[in-house]
Image (cartoon, helix red, strand yellow):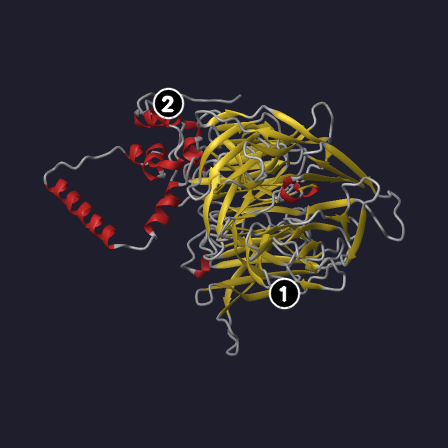
Amino acid sequence: MVAPGALRVVRCGGGALRGARAVFSADSKYLLYVSGDFVKVYSVYTEETLRLIGGHADLVTGIQLNPHNHMQFYSCSLDGTIKLWDFMDGIPIKTFTVGTKLLALFTLASVEDSVFVVIPKSGERDTFQLVSVKLTKGVGQDLEGKELSVVLDDVGASVKHIAFGREGAYVVSVKDVNLQVYFFKRKLLNRFSLSTVKTKGGDNRFSCVVCHPKEDCIATGHADGKIRLWRNFHLKKEYTYSTLHWHHDIVMDLAFTMEGTRLLSGGVESVLVQWHNESSCQKDFLPRLGSPIEYISMASDGVLCCTLHTDNRISIINSNLRFSRSIQGLIKSRDVKTGLVVDPRTKALVLNGEPGHLQFYSLQSDQQLFSLDIVQRQYIHQAGLKQSDLVKVAFSARGTWLATVEESEEVTDPELQLKLWLYNEEIQSFELNTRINTPHDNHITDMCFRDMDELGDDSLILVTTGRDCVFKVWVMVEDTDPEAQQSVSWSCDFVGSYHNYQATNCCFSEDGSLLAVSFEETVTVWDSLTWDLKCTFCHPPGNIRNICFGRLTCSKYLVGATDYGFLCCWNLLTCALEWSAHLNVVVLQPDPLSEHIAAVSWLSKESSLFVFKPNEPWPTYIQRNLCKEKILLAAFVPRDEPEIASSEKYLWLRKSQLFFLTDTQELMTLSTMSLEERLTPSSKQLAVEESLPVTPFSLLLGKHRRQQAQEDIDLGKLVVHNKQEQASPAVKELLHTPAHVLPSASFLCTIFINSLLISKENKSSPVCESNY
């Protein structure tokens, strides 16, 4: 468990969908889906995310509606807990601690006090069990869920590998080429196996299973694209199955409609297939859904279904197989070559999306704002075909200009294009201004804008570096052609080099007066007005991997990391090495709003975070074993409002929030929120309350409250509350949560009393903390 006030890593988007199907509410007005450590509640009609429900300390792996109260749902997580939530108010009702990783979750209407989960089998690697967990009834919110009963051994870890039959009479599990059916009342287990021999392109391995809601029929998907419909499986030898076949590759998921008259299937073809009456001849298609279908979910009234895709898209589809709308999260690209870049206009993360596109991803809503087609060519999905893709992107200080680099996948002689885009306020998007063919003779390694006021066009400069051993300076010039569509364009103004070394990185100082360019093992510093070489720095052995200037009070320092595992800090006034540390830094990211710099290291298969100021000998913050995945990219995103730090060592997170992208393309961030602050998103609840229809009673009550407040001011009786008390989540919890879903008073008492206490932190003298 994480100590109160400690930083914890929160997964907030991207990556795989982790085996959790989306769930419709009973009235089909809302869709609940998993996003990292959170569950999001999405309005099907208004197309907005209404609530972000968080409380788990690790990935959420399953969600299911409570079959006995459709305003509630269960969730399970890798943190070993099952939580019961009220999703309309976003608060936890009960937490059951199981104590082992939970990989999938199932609920049955016929079972009142138990749920079913998939857990790892103790003492055996990659072996899983389906167990029943008895949900203890007791006083308080936190309860034990240690009473486990094994239902099936050697099951698949995914929710797609297990299904419960009609009225919960039996459960089915598939793994490899084996199918097993367990009948609860008879306590009978039947096992069936298919041939393991692959013939004529056939592959009998099971990929998914689903049960008919009204009949004793099992539908299974297979690796070769076939669908089998099993019957008479209560008899071990007289079972039968029929076969449906359209998919040319693995069947990713299956779903029956509520009455069982139609079967839906999806796979890598990005096509949703609807089978009628279990017949190969009667089927309908919904093609071009964008990416392979990972999961299919049906609404309980049969009006809607949704498909979850491998690129983090959710498509909502009507019962007549017509596309309705989609929720697009962070697209999982093949390779994020652009890095993590922040759009100054929207504060959205910008990175590779669909092939040849830039995706603008909103961190607040976990949805894509829009996608910009950069390459403007049709991408052909064919292995071995060399095609152009987006590799570099940079924004000017105010987001008015966007620079992109696209190149073909050729290693020796790539086809390069540098494009400059100007933001058009009328269409609220970027328009292509200048296209430059072959800006360098070899791959472009880095580029950056001079970060200065854009009111003067002469101050706006773009620098690119390349493996052709030069850096180039690009400036805006007036277009004298009277027939030109734009008044300005871009052209090369200066070309610089250093001893015929490859140029690898570049960055401007905060005031834009200096440009740093790394050439293999050497860092060069140039005057950005005259382009004179001012000084050079070197720290052999090893090439320079990252460089950045200090900011604000640390603007006289230049920091660099080498691929031989050294982090160096040079003083620009003395032109000498200030300090160096032996650290294998793979990511070096400065905060644009403070002096802090974040360095992420990779050692012994774990990522660690070091936050420091260049003018201080000790790091401000260290967190070792940040995550097991390798962190490839990072970005500081400015906050809308400064955050109140719970400790002095977290002041570096006050103005900006740090986000990471791992090699599995999971987006992570660091959070200081304690458990009680994550109980309910009260601000969202208040926003919903304010948007409710205004009634005569509410108008009368509001008028009375305003009059009373004015009288208190006039009489000098206005009570000034402490800001921390006003913002206390515990007080909001009591005032804005319906009584029937409030946790017990004993649970809220401690939180409420603590919220009334005045912290001593501001009175005590600051203490220097070090994690060394």
Q: Compute the Cα span from label 2 to label 1.
A: 56 Å
The x, y position of residue 239, in whole percent, is 81, 45
Q: Say which amino acid is labelled 1.
A: Gln
- Which residue is label 1 attached to? 376
Looking at this view, is 28 or 751 the one in front? 28
Would you say 56 lies left or right of 604 here? Answer: left
x, y percent for residue 317: 58, 59
352 w.r.t. 147: above or below: below
> What number of labels is visible?
2
Point out which mark residue 390 bears: none
Residue 141 shown left or right of residue 694 in the figure: right
Which structural element holds mark 1? loop
Where residue 610 sits, quadrant-wise, is top right
Between 688 and 211, the one nearer to me in the picture:
211
Which residue is identified by label 2? 766
Q: Residue at x 62, y 43 (%)?
A: 167
**518 or 181, which is in the foreground?**
181
